[in-house]
Image (spheres, rainbow, N blue to C red):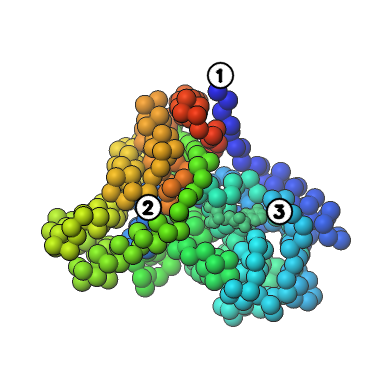
């Protein structure tokens, strides 16, 4: 019988104990405190962020923990249970392109806080995490957000106390990832880790110029009361050509918007008052012999609509009815946006055949994770069906996480 690999979330006590012990073993004395931040999963709204669209993430119960103590000087010294040795740098040496390795995600946050006008000194910190790396569940944002809330506390900034302050920390952590770690991500991950709430999804709107409280709206997503849960499947599929394909998708979207004389593809979406997809496709046809541009546009526009409608259903307490939107999202990402892969398709097909209410790939694609909305009573059946399908296909064993909408960084 195939084994099912569950990745359990640590309890807060367990996470705190791990980093406290790692800190004490690695540095003299005790940390000033322990903070943590979750990974995230996107329910719907994929490849919409760079089209000024909508997406709807929740925070995972899986978190990255950090024990931290400020220093008198500007030295940053870090250890992680997931990395070898001690990572060290002076804050005065941190600049775009100047630091390498995992510590860039940490020192980058201190750098970005300083850039935003806050006074930040050096520190020692120990990190440990049950968020898997590179599974599309945003271990990088969990790390940045954990650092941000820790530095917020030890420097007395108080930004964590309000959603507007948290939105400021989203900008800080996004800058750390973009400019110091050198990863061109759009803010979805950091927003989710810092601004989601337990029992809620976060409707993010990437229209430029919105105020923080308009750009991120909590939507009650009470799965437990509905007898449901979210199953995440880390396919372990190797991402290949991700950067080039991502760049190509972005370029197609920009080209289509320019041909249509729009700022962004969002402006087509009918639920948001746009011209509608039929007119947009007709206008693109003369410039699009192979149909690629039209397929890309059809995904983005339909996905923005699906996200808006999914959020409406969830608001009405109809979480059990969102399944068809998840499947439609997957089909659109697979056929029109062409960012799925064999493993992601297999999760969706096998989970649906085993009784999931909905399933789709999540994250950028070409590997990473898929999600399934399942009745609590069906969790084991669905997980077993997926594990069996992977075994039959001769694929690496996937890893399963249960992901009820969880608490933000704190
Ligand atoms: P993900 O989809 O998990 O965010 P990324 O490639 O964006 O994948 O980020 C993973 C990187 O973040 C790791 O390679 C590492 O550099 C850093 N990272 C995340 N969590 C930790 C941790 N607990 N300890 C050390 N480095 C970490
Ligand atoms: Mg990441």
First in sequence, mark 1 or 2: give its number: 1
Residue 403 position, x and y percent, is: 51, 41
* 128 and 388: which is toward the camera: 388
In the rendered image, which residue does mark 3 sit on?
A: 83
- Quadrant location of the N terminus? top right
Q: Which residue appears at 21% of the width and 54% of the height?
A: 291
Check disc 3: other Cα within 10 Å, few if <14, some if 14-19, many if 20+: some
Q: Is residue 315 left or right of residue 398?
A: left
Q: Which residue appears at 27% of the width and 71% of the height?
A: 263
Q: Is mark 3 within 8 Å of ligand 1?
A: yes
In the rendered image, which residue does mark 1 sit on?
A: 1
Q: Which residue appears at 60% of the width and 37% of the height?
A: 7
* 52 and 237: which is toward the camera: 237
Residue 127 position, x and y percent, is: 70, 55
Check disc 2: other Cα within 10 Å, few if <14, some if 14-19, many if 20+: many
Residue 277 position, x and y percent, is: 18, 56
Check disc 1: other Cα within 10 Å, few if <14, some if 14-19, many if 20+: few
| 184 is higher (above) or lower (below) than 8 | below
Look at the numbered disc 1 and give the secondary structure of its residue: loop
- Quadrant location of the C terminus? bottom right
| 114 is higher (above) or lower (below) than 228 | below
Instruction: Quadrant for residue 258, please give it.
Output: bottom left
Q: Is residue 198 left or right of residue 312?
A: right
Is residue 52 in view from this perspective?
A: no
| 309 is higher (above) or lower (below) than 397 | below
Mark 2 vs mark 3, foreground winner is 3
In the rendered image, which residue does mark 2 sit on?
A: 46
């Amino acid at each position: 019988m195939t084994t099912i690999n569950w990745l359990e979330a640590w309890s807060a006590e367990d996470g705190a104990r791990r980093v406290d012990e790692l800190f004490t073993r690695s540095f003299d004395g005790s940390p000033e405190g322990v903070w943590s931040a979750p990974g995230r999963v996107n329910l719907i709204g994929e490849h919409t962020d760079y089209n000024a669209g909508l997406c709807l993430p929740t925070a995972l119960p899986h978190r990255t923990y950090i024990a931290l103590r400020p220093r008198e000087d500007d030295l940053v010294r870090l250890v992680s249970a997931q990395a070898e040795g001690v990572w060290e740098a002076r804050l005065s040496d941190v600049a775009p392109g100047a630091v390498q390795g995992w510590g860039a995600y940490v020192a980058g946050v201190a750098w970005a806080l300083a850039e935003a006008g806050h006074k930040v000194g050096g520190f020692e910190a120990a990190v440990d995490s049950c968020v898997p790396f590179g599974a599309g569940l945003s271990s990088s944002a969990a790390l940045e957000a954990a650092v941000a809330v820790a530095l917020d506390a030890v420097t007395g900034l108080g930004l964590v106390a309000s959603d507007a302050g948290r939105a400021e920390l989203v900008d800080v952590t996004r800058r750390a990832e973009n400019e110091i770690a050198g990863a061109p991500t759009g803010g979805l991950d950091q927003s989710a880790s810092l601004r989601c709430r337990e029992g809620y999804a976060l409707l993010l709107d990437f229209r430029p110029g919105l105020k923080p409280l308009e750009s991120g709206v909590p939507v009650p997503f009470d799965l437990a009361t509905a007898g449901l849960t979210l199953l995440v499947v880390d396919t372990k599929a190797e991402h290949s050509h991700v950067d080039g394909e991502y760049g190509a998708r972005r370029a197609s979207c920009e080209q289509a918007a320019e041909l249509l004389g729009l700022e962004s593809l969002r402006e087509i979406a009918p639920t948001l008052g746009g011209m509608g997809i039929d007119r947009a496709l007709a206008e693109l046809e003369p410039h699009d012999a192979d149909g690629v541009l039209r397929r890309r546009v059809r995904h983005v526009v339909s996905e923005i609509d699906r996200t808006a409608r999914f959020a409406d259903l969830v608001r009405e307490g109809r979480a059990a009815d969102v399944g068809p939107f998840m499947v439609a999202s997957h089909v659109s990402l697979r056929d029109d946006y062409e960012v799925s892969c064999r493993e992601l398709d297999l999760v969706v097909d096998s989970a649906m055949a085993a009784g999931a209410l909905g399933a789709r790939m999540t994250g950028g694609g070409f590997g990473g994770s898929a999600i399934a909305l399942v009745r609590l009573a069906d969790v084991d059946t669905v997980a077993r069906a997926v594990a069996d399908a992977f075994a039959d296909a001769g694929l690496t064993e996937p890893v399963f996480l249960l992901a009820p909408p969880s608490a933000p960084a704190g």
